[in-house]
């Protein structure tokens, strides 16, 4: 009889594993070979998985790795692995890699997600993963460790990553049995598993196999591009699936195939399938499969080149045309979903290419990204108060609320009521984004309710935003659509995709946009933006959130390519000591791309750019309050 499996308690903090590694100096090689890094990432995540579960674990899959910075020779790497999602017998471990260079400059290298499965016990019984719990911590001690918000965000992202991967697996799975020359795999490479390749469970180490797969992918890319391997780089690993393992003396066969070429030849997807061959019988069984994205690299300068021929026929003459089309279409679909996950889960990259399969997860993740910024009070994220038009620091206090309740009889007059306005700014680096900054404004708008103010923000933007010409709905959520069953989404989430006509200065794409704005000389020009708007109103109208970000919709006007990073509003009621509603607490957050703004305003320093955007945010608050006071009625209080 199998022994009963018992879950034990374990905290995410106690299971975190930190490793460091030095990138060796070399006179011939400027950047680090990615293969050793994949092995290190596997070691660190395996250690975190086993530290959390208390038993040996095996790698089931890894993926969604995008290298934002390729480590350079002489840098030091910091790898931090933490469990982020626990199933019954599986565990997701997230790992962040940071490089430390000259003057202590830290650069974000990549984030990856590994899935592990617990091994069975001595009697063959399943051993379950402990649930993720948090260590009791001293609220006054912020000297080490992640904040509670950061940990919850990591778990949320892990949950939705699984949901988005299921979307991909339904239509473009890599697990189909197509591992032969008849399917375009024209070359093969062999490796023999030696004792040095074993892990601590006497099986082939997964990191070694991933390194071999990366080598096969680079070899195929070199063959197809006719470029030496030193001028090619692995920029991303979509996913590597480990369906079965191997042992010492096994012969592993690696078959790479170029599936598609992107961006006119800048990059390509190389699929690598791994099989295990029996020496005696010669029979093979499928073992691993994975996809690698490879692009060129210039040793002199950082110019992006095009190593692949966009007219490449891939040498698929033996393949049926329908199969060729499906292989290429699946590759483009996988890349589209990888970029969507990168944008929705990490806030990195270009705007999401809209597709009906994203209509469940994309609105929720847009809202969650905004709520993360709304509620983020972590001191390590560098929030600082920022003063622009009004130089006084104000916070919402009980005295302000008391004074607001005495003004309730004056509603309907032209006087504007805004109390406790405060503006904060922080760079995007602590949240994993380079060259961005985040503004967060907070205030109390008096003599209104959450539904009334939400209606003005959502439906009357042209009245309070001087740079909004019009808003046209392209697509919206159909009533009766099944909702996600996650607990924190029990209230209805609605969404639409809109064409937002922005009014910007003439010649804004060239230079001087912010300069003209700052000097109030604004020759206007219409620029279409395509946004997804997602909103949720709490039970009893107690809270409301409206979030938006850029998407690429097929029905959007041509030229709607301007990047708009996540932004949104969060509303909650403010009551006096007697429980009467006296106003609404309003929080607005927006993330700006500093590189884009620098290009628009080359004459301005970064401080002036931030001040200009902050001034616009502050004006919005006062205009909202002005519109609210004009539309208010005695029933509003």
Image (tube, grey):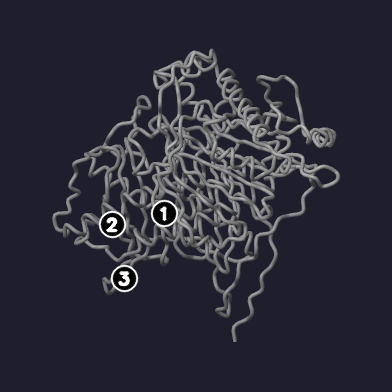
Q: Nearer the viewer, mark 1 or mark 2?
A: 1
Q: CA distance from mark 1 to mark 2?
A: 16 Å
Residue 154, percent across and down? 59, 50
Q: Earlier in the sequence, mark 1 or mark 3?
A: 1
Along the polypeptide, which appears first: circle 1 or circle 2? 1
- Residue 222 % position (x, y): 26, 42
| Residue 255's disc number | 2
Residue 385 falls left or right of residue 529: right
Which residue appears at 33% of the width and 39% of the height?
Answer: 295
* Residue 135 or residue 494, whichever sits in front: 494
Task: Provide the residue designation for mark 3.
Answer: 278
Number of residues whose C-alpha sits closer than 10 Å to that of mark 3, classed few (under 14), some (14–19) or many (20 or more)? some
Q: Is residue 485 above or below residue 602?
A: below
Comparing 142 with 551, the one in front is: 551
In front of the other: label 1 or label 3? 1
Q: Given contact means CB atoms under 8 Å apart, are the residues at marks 2 and 3 in contact?
A: no
Q: CA distance from mark 2 to mark 3?
A: 17 Å
User: Where residue 101 sits: x, y (%)?
Assistant: 54, 30
Helix, strand, or loop for circle 2? strand
Residue found 36% across the figure and 40% down from its top: 556
Kindly give the residue lying farthest to the bottom in the view shown: 1
Q: What SS does tag 1 mark?
A: strand
- In the picture, the disc for residue 239 is 1
Residue 458 against residue 89 in the figure, above or below: above
Crowd class of label 1 (few under 14; some 14 to 19; many from 20; radius 10 Å): many
Image location of residue 385, percent across then percent down: 70, 27
């Amino acid at each position: 009889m199998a022994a009963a499996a018992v879950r034990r308690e374990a905290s995410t903090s106690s299971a975190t594993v930190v490793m460091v590694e030095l990138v060796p100096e070399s006179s011939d090689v400027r950047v680090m070979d990615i293969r050793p890094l994949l092995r290190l990432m596997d070691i660190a995540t395996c250690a975190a998985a086993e530290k959390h579960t208390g038993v040996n674990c095996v790698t089931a899959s890894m993926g969604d790795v995008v290298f934002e910075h390729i480590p350079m020779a002489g840098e030091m790497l910091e790898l931090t692995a933490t469990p982020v999602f626990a199933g019954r017998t599986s565990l997701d471990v997230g790992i962040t890699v940071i490089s430390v260079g000259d003057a202590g400059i830290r650069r974000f290298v990549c984030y990856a997600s590994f899935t592990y499965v617990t091994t069975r016990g001595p009697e063959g019984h399943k051993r379950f993963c402990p649930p993720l719990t948090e260590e009791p911590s001293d609220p006054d001690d912020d000297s080490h460790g992640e904040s509670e918000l950061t940990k919850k965000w990591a778990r949320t992202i892990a949950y939705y990553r699984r949901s988005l991967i299921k979307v991909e697996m339904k239509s473009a799975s890599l697990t189909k049995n197509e591992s032969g020359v008849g399917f375009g795999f024209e070359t093969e490479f062999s490796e023999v598993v030696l004792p040095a390749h074993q892990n601590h469970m006497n099986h082939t180490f997964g990191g070694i196999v991933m390194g071999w797969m990366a080598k096969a992918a680079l070899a195929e890319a070199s063959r197809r591009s006719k470029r030496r391997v030193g001028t090619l780089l692995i920029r991303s690993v979509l996913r590597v699936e480990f369906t079965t393992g191997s042992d010492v003396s096994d012969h592993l066969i690696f078959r790479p195939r170029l599936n598609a070429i992107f961006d006119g030849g800048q990059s390509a997807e190389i699929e690598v399938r791994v099989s295990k061959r029996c020496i005696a019988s010669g029979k093979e069984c499928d073992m691993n499969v994975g996809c690698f994205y490879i692009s060129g690299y210039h040793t002199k300068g950082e110019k992006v080149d095009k190593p692949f021929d966009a007219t490449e026929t891939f040498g698929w003459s033996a393949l049926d045309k329908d199969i060729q089309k499906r292989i290429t279409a699946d590759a483009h679909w996988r890349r589209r979903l990888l970029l969507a996950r990168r944008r929705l889960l990490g806030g990195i990259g270009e705007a999401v290419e809209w597709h009906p399969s994203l209509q469940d997860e994309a609105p929720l993740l847009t809202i969650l990204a905004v709520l993360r910024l709304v509620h983020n009070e972590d001191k390590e994220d560098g929030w600082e108060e920022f003063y622009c038009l009004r130089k006084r620091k104000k916070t919402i206090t009980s005295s302000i609320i008391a004074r607001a309740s005495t003004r309730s009889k004056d509603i309907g007059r032209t006087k504007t009521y805004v109390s406790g306005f405060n503006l904060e700014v922080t760079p995007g680096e602590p949240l994993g984004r380079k060259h961005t900054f985040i503004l967060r404004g907070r205030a109390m708008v008096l003599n209104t309710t959450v539904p009334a103010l939400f209606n003005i923000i959502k439906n009357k933007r042209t009245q309070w935003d001087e740079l909004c010409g019009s808003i046209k709905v392209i697509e919206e959520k159909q009533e009766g659509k099944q909702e996600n069953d996650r607990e924190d989404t029990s209230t209805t989430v609605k969404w639409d995709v809109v064409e937002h006509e922005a009014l910007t200065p003439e010649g804004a794409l060239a230079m001087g946009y912010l300069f003209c704005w700052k000097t109030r000389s604004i020759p206007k020009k219409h620029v279409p933006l395509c946004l997804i708007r997602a909103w949720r109103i709490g039970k009893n109208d107690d809270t409301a959130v409206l979030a938006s970000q850029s998407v690429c919709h097929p029905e959007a006007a041509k030229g709607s390519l301007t990047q708009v990073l996540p932004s949104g509003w969060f509303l909650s009621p403010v009551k006096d000591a007697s429980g009467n509603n006296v106003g609404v607490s309003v929080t607005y957050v927006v993330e700006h791309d500093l590189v884009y703004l620098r290009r628009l305003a080359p004459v301005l320093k970064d401080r002036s750019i931030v001040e200009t955007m902050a001034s616009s945010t502050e004006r919005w608050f006062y205009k909202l309050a002005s519109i609210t006071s004009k539309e208010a009625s005695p029933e509003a209080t």
